[in-house]
Amino acid sequence: MPRDVLTTKLAGFGTTIFAEMSALATSTGSINLGQGFPDTDGPAAVLDAAVDAIRSGVNQYPPGLGDPDLRQAIAEHHLRWYGLDVDPDTQVVVTAGATEALAGAMLGMLDTGDEVVLFEPIYDSYQAGIALAGATPVPVLLTPADDGRWHFDADALRAAVTDRTKLILLNTPHNPTGKVFDRSELELIAAVAIEHDLIVVTDEVYEHLVFEGSEHIPLATLPGMFERTLTISSGGKTFHTTGWKIGWMTGPEELVTAGRLAKQYLTYVNGAPFQPATAVGLRLGDDYYRTLVTDLQAARDCLADGLERAGFTTYRPEASYFVTVDIRSIGFDGNAMDFCRSLPATAGVVAVPASAFYMHPEHGDHLVRFACCKQLDVITAAVDKLVSAFGSTSSSTPSGATS
Ligand code: PMP
Ligand code: GLN
């Protein structure tokens, strides 16, 4: 066996926490509230369109930029929801999920020694993409405040920018906290980007999973931001098709081209029959999108209420698939990883340690993420197990948590 098989760029990276915890759920027969994927199929029209595409011969490489009709549907989507006018031929590229768009952006834009400012906790693929590009992530910490929202310190953001910073990587709505960056926070980020002439890459895969009381605002819609923002999203969350891996990047031609040049050497293209099917999804009526949120919000409330009943300090998300809890409130004597590895035996449930989302795991050692993108009876069964394993039966609403 040759020595030093693994590139030093990936030193410290192991199997992703999602793969590890899903395998644990399978091997222990536990209820999997770890990895974020829905346990129901998406709209029949979208599924039927994929089947029709396969049956009608859409099975070879699609064009390098992506199926023209999907690119058109993405452009229509941006106009319909955000008033953003993008040219489907020069400002849209279809990717193998948001994951490949993110990797393409990092590999296509970053040089060795460049710095990327991002908000911690950090979705796992960001650090890997930045490391593979030879660049350095510089985190700005999000912390929960008494109002239950996660905040960052404006001075910490300004201080994170150096003369080596090339881009800011923003995830809104945010995984794992479920934070939706509001307009004033986005204005602050935009001002920093403009002042230092930075590119911003935004990951908006939860754009349609925003609960009552919050609003998703794409950074690209702020004055002066379209020209410096590469926006990334995908169909997986919106259409319950996480296994299809159809994503996209949109923005000014120069940024999209940089991402595409790297992307074309990763997969080149993917998912031919799923591309027209995703176009059908993007064109579904408002009713579909409304029901998607209403159903997920009921699931969020069921899970968050149950976690509170089990005694956890619970951070109710403004959006996304995830509810984060503080395990100190149940008196757990150990860190989040210990907690999650023992949870199948203790309660027959799998969750994800939020510490896996931190460059400094000690910042998240007490935080555990549960997925709410499951059927209500599955969530109820998981909650019953958690309440009987840990539980007080009265709801707990300590400071910093929503109730
Ligand atoms: N970004 C975030 C914040 C995510 O939570 C995920 C997981 N779905 C992705 C990107 C990856 O998206 P995709 O499955 O489209 O590659
Ligand atoms: N985005 C999903 C999550 O946060 C996982 C996707 C993956 O396994 N890479 O759970």
Image (tube, rainbow, N blue to C red):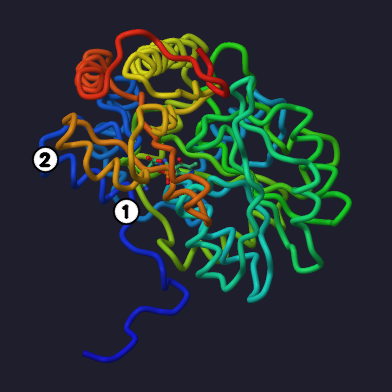
Question: Callout 1: few (<14), some (14-19), or many (20+) C-alpha neighbours within 10 Å?
Answer: few
Distance between the alpha carbons at the discs numbered 1 and 2: 39 Å
Depth order, front residue of 8/367? 367
Name the residue at the right extreme.
195
* Residue 90 visible in the snapshot: no
Q: Is residue 102 above or below residue 314?
A: below
Q: Which residue is identified by label 1?
A: 60
In the rendered structure, which amino acid carries the disc numbered 1? Gln
In the rendered structure, which disc, 1 or 2, sits on the residue that comes first in sequence? 2
Residue at left offset 77%, top offset 42%: 189
Q: Nearer the viewer, mark 1 or mark 2?
A: 2
Q: Is mark 1 within 8 Å of ligand 1?
A: no
- Left or right: where 326 falls relative to 29: right
- Residue 21, placed above or below residue 216: below
Tell me the quarter of the image containing the N terminus.
Answer: bottom left
Q: Position of residue 350 (x, y in %)?
A: 24, 36
Tell me: 218 left or right of 72. right
Q: Where residue 396 sits in the image (x, y, percent)?
A: 43, 14
Ligand 2 sits in quadrant: top left
At 72% from the left and 26% from the top, the residue drawn is 83
Q: Residue at x 29, y 31 (%)?
A: 33
- The image quarter containing residue 32 is top left
Foreground pick, 172 / 399: 399
Q: Residue furthest bottom?
A: 2
Residue labelled 2 has its Cβ within 8 Å of some atom of ligand 2: no
Residue 255 located left or right of residue 25: right
Which image quadrant is residue 245 in? top left
Query: In the rendering, which numbered label is found on residue 28?
Result: 2
Q: Secondary structure at mark 1?
A: loop
- Where residue 46 sits in the image (x, y, percent)? 35, 26
